[in-house]
Amino acid sequence: MIELTRLNKQKNEKFILNSELIETIEEKPDTTIRLVNGKNIVVVESSAQVVSKVLAYKRTIYGR
């Protein structure tokens, strides 16, 4: 599970995402995460930041 910030027009909201559900991450120009269920989420973080958070989370689970 990783904490991200949803990009909204009115305010940015923090939320927790199950990183196992991520199918693709694109920057066009906003970072869009496509989940395995077809849902898209636009976040403030860059794709590199999302990947870094996923790797850090998996390291805590599986070790190095």
Image (cartoon, helix red, strand yellow):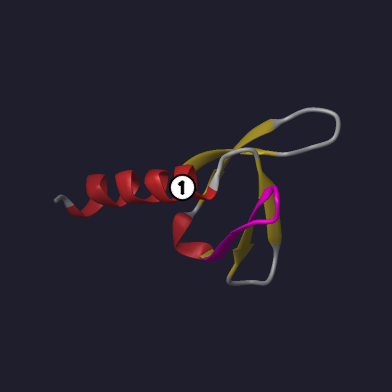
Residue at the spot 31% in from the left edge and 44% down from the top edge:
56
Residue 2 vertical placement versus 36 (above, below) = above
Q: Quadrant of residue 27?
A: bottom right
Q: Is residue 16 left or right of residue 42?
A: left
Local packing at callout 1 (Cα closer than 10 Å; few below 14, some 14-19, many 20+) is few
- What is the magenta range? 23-32
Residue at the spot 33% in from the left edge and 50% down from the top edge:
55
State the residue lying farthest toward the top: 11
Residue 15 x/y as whole percent: 60, 38
Residue 15 among those drawn in magenta: no
Residue 53 vertical placement versus 41 (above, below) = above
Residue 13 x/y as whole percent: 69, 32
State the residue lying farthest toward the right: 10
Residue 23 vertical placement versus 53 (above, below) = below
Q: Is residue 11 left or right of residue 1?
A: right
Q: Taken as a whole, is the magenta stretch helix, strand or loop? A: strand
Q: Quadrant of residue 24?
A: bottom right
Residue at the spot 70% in from the left edge and 50% down from the top edge:
29
Residue 25 vertical placement versus 13 (above, below) = below
Residue 27 among those drawn in magenta: yes
Residue at disc 1, secondary structure: helix
Q: Is residue 30 left or right of residue 57?
A: right
User: Nearest the camera: 53 or 36?
Assistant: 53
Residue at the spot 14% in from the left edge and 51% down from the top edge:
64
State the residue lying farthest toward the front: 29
Residue 28 x/y as whole percent: 70, 55
**Residue type of the residue flagged with mark 1:** Ala
Q: How many marks?
A: 1
Identify residue for label 1: 48
Residue 26 x/y as whole percent: 61, 59
